[in-house]
Image (spheres, rainbow, N blue to C red):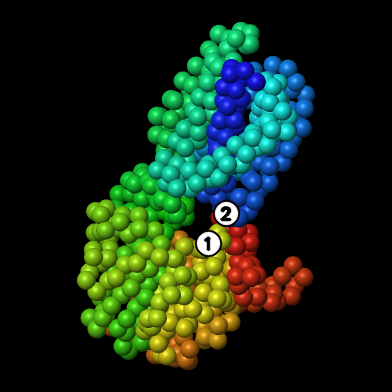
Amino acid sequence: MNEKAIRQSKLIYWASGIVSICGIIFEVLFGALGSYILGDGVKQYTLTISLFLTGMGVGASVSERVTRNLIIAFVWTEFMVAMIGGFSSFLMFGMTAFAPSGSDALFLYLVTFTVGALTGVELPVLIRKANEIGVELNKSTARVLFSDYAGGLIGGLLFAFYLRPEMGMVKSAFFVGVINLSVAVLVLFYFKKEIKKFSFHLGSAVFIGVLLVSGLFFGEELAFSFEQKLYKDPILHIEDTPYQKIVLTKEGEDVRLFLNGSLQFSSVDEHRYHETLVHLPLAYKKEVEDVLVLGGGDGLAVRELLKYENLSSVTLVDLDPAVVELATENPHLEQLNKGALEDPSVDVLHEDAFQYLEETDNRFDAVLIDLPDPNNESLNKLYTKEFYSLVRNHLEPEGIMMAQATSPVFATEVYWTIDETVKATGMNTYNFHVDVPSFGNWGFVMASRGDIDVDEASIGVETEFLTEDVISALTVFGKDTDREIIDSDGQVKNLEPNTLIHPNLIQKYEEAWKHY
């Protein structure tokens, strides 16, 4: 090959590597979008990866018909990837805010398949062009594929460790779209002499570039206005962390915290939830010195714990430092939790709760589990027999556990499956539910190794809601929320514990909450 052909072939290899980086970023971005907006992370990642790969196969098949004007075919493929992929996140949030229910999922799957198909066209076209330049077919194929696979690794790492946490999903999509467009423009200029109507193609690139750059600088703000429509009240704080999306809203005196779109508390009635979580189990424990709180990074459960003068230590384990940072620095949350997380008796650890229990040797008089609902795989493991067994093993012999367990009204089977899972560890369980207006009716499972006389409760601290008389009422479940769940054949369902090997809670949760 002459020197020009060598330079052109090198450009093709670099282009294949860069567009493969963009392709894998779009692929995982679509999975993240589906997980955040539609829920059930494994399901959404499975669907998006399957659709993307199927699209690549279809695109590769279609590319057989592209035998002429290979550079123009590649350039316009990149134009389309840049536009469709670049605007994907922005439009997805718009669909969620304005379009009928279910259309956002259809839109995401269609975009995933389309971008996958366009990605499938890219590589065969580049291989043919390398071969056309004079590179042997086996060498051109191997080198382009090497660039593609190596680029895939880089793309995945970039999205996980930089783009998503630093730029968010809207800016990331526009940014990657700009990269796709830049590759197309570079190739366009490099092969300028063999391209007809060069000015038309360049003008199209400029037009697309203006749209993408505008989206990069202003799209997130507009998407924020879309997302605002998903929340009843004005948004005070919004943040994408490596673990979740945090949204804080305020209307009048009502401050609300949302994680991944799910309400965590309303300041108007959170005392009903947190008093039940904290004071109800401690009403059966005369002496409590060391308490473990799993979750609860907002500091509200710790606020209630600090009412006990004989308490020696509180260990709070919350995975996301951004939640704790918000709870200690935001004036609305700090006023609500009364600066509880900065108390010298409180030790805050940013670890996975499961891993913490596996590694620590500490034992506790009480373990309070204030974790989000089991709506994805990472949370599901914190509702398994294995997890509750670890909790049991870190309780003192007379220790007590209290876990929030979703709504026995909206998700009856989920609630009683959690109870069955805790029972499977050998502990005795006790069931309570409380009305929290912002949530609805909410359930808790209390457990201990020994027997507890539920008639012997004594509350020794100041409360706004909970009394000894109220506690007895919290143990009564209606016929439509009791343990005997009737299946479609009129038989009582046999509830199986949720385990790591056989996780059955996520699907039940998804089915229960899809109408609410």
Contact, CB < 8 Å: mark 2 with mark 1?
A: yes
Q: Secondary structure at mark 2?
A: helix
Lower sequence index among marks 2 and 1: 2
Q: Nearer the viewer, residue 505 or 195?
A: 195
Please tell me whether residue 126 is drawn above or below residue 404 in the rendered image: above
Quarter of the image that includes the C terminus: bottom right
Image position of 152 (left or right of 492) = left
Q: Amino acid at mark 2?
A: Gly
Q: Position of residue 188 (x, y in %)?
A: 57, 17
Quarter of the image that includes the N terminus: top right
Query: Residue 378 shows which numbered tag?
Result: 1
Image position of 359 (left or right of 410) = left
Neighbor class of circle 2 (other Cα within 10 Å; few <14, some 14-19, many 20+) is many
Q: Secondary structure at mark 1?
A: helix
Q: Write the residue at 45% across / 28% down.
A: 215
Q: Which residue corresponds to mark 2?
A: 41
Please tell me whether residue 328 is drawn above or below residue 414 in the rendered image: above
Q: Position of residue 438 (x, y in %)?
A: 42, 59
Neighbor class of circle 1 (other Cα within 10 Å; few <14, some 14-19, many 20+) is few
- Residue furthest toward the front? 2
Q: Write the residue at 42% across / 90% down.
A: 397
Image position of 303 (left or right of 153) = left
Q: Write the residue at 68% across / 26% down.
A: 135
Q: Alpha-carbon distance for marks 2 and 1?
A: 9 Å
Please tell me whether residue 317 is drawn above or below residue 333 in the rendered image: below
Q: Nearer the viewer, residue 378 or 327?
A: 378
Q: Position of residue 305 (x, y in %)?
A: 30, 75
Q: Amino acid at mark 1?
A: Ser
Query: Residue 112 shows which numbered tag?
Result: none
